[in-house]
Image (spheres, helix red, strand yellow):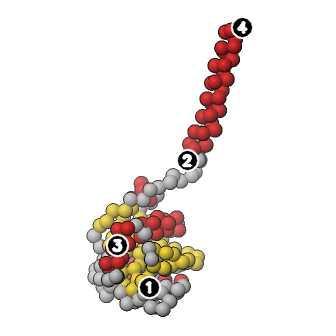
């Protein structure tokens, strides 16, 4: 009788342990292993050399994020454009963003993917929008353009992607632009 009671206690303990595992650990693992689900990426941006010739806006900063860190290779180009923004309204709408974007660096031929939306980078306001690159010799398939301003001066960021789904990388680009190093650079570049 004593042996049966001990066996029952052990069996209940084992059942509790298994139930605890499935209640706590299994859901954590399952949400990361759903068939067809993409893993969560943690972007790591590496700075490189500005690859474009100098134009009226000068050079900027060039960054890359590897496919292992961003889901696909992403190239990001950021530069200041002094005195080129409407001092009263900034980047007020998609027409302003389309005009101020740096697509001339990558062939100039784009087609918007939906409407843009307002963004905040540090103390600055602006807009972001996704595009398909439609030029014959485009350096990618799609892009995200982000422009934000401080009074009459602005910063433009262009992220290039090798596939037709630019929207998912936007949050990572905005997070990167909002890091302390990039905000300090923006202050210097804008002469603040």
Q: Is residue 42 positioned above or below 170 on the image? A: above
Q: Which quadrant is the C terminus positioned in?
A: bottom left
Q: Which disc is residue 1 wearing?
A: 4
Report the number of discs: 4
- Left or right of 38 on screen, residue 105: left
Q: Which disc is residue 100 wearing?
A: 1
Q: Secondary structure at mark 1?
A: helix
For discs 3 and 1, the disc positioned in front in the rendered view: 3
Q: Earlier in the sequence, mark 3 or mark 4?
A: 4
Front-most of 109 and 67? 67
Q: Earlier in the sequence, mark 4 or mark 1?
A: 4
Residue at mark 3: 184
For discs 4 and 1, the disc positioned in front in the rendered view: 4
Residue at mark 2: 32
Q: Which disc is residue 68 wearing?
A: none
> CA gap, disc 2 to disc 3?
36 Å
Q: Earlier in the sequence, mark 2 or mark 4?
A: 4
Q: Earlier in the sequence, mark 1 or mark 2?
A: 2
Q: Name which residue lies at 58% across and 51% down.
A: 36
Q: Secondary structure at mark 4?
A: loop
Residue 103 screen position, x and y as percent: 42, 80
> CA gap, disc 1 to disc 2?
40 Å
Contact flag, marks 3 and 1 (Cβ < 8 Å)? no
For discs 2 and 3, the disc positioned in front in the rendered view: 3
* Res 53 → quadrant: bottom left
Q: Earlier in the sequence, mark 3 or mark 1?
A: 1
């Amino acid at each position: 009788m004593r042996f049966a009671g001990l066996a029952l206690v052990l069996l209940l303990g084992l059942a509790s342990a298994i139930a605890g595992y499935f209640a706590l650990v299994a859901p954590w693992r399952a949400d990361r292993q759903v068939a067809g689900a993409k893993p969560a990426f943690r972007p790591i941006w590496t700075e490189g050399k500005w690859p474009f010739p100098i134009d009226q806006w000068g050079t900027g900063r060039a960054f890359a994020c590897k496919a292992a860190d961003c889901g696909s290779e992403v190239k990001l180009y950021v530069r200041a454009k002094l005195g080129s923004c409407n001092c009263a309204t900034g980047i007020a709408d998609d027409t302003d963003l389309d005009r101020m974007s740096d697509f001339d660096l990558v062939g100039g031929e784009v087609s918007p993917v939906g409407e843009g939306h307002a963004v905040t980078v540090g103390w600055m306001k602006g807009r972001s929008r996704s595009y398909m690159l439609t030029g014959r010799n485009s350096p990618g398939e799609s892009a995200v353009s982000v422009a934000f301003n401080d009074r009459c001066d602005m910063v433009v960021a262009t992220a290039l992607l090798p596939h037709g789904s630019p929207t998912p990388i936007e949050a990572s680009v905005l997070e990167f632009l909002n890091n302390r190093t990039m905000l300090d650079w923006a202050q210097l570049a804008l002469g603040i």
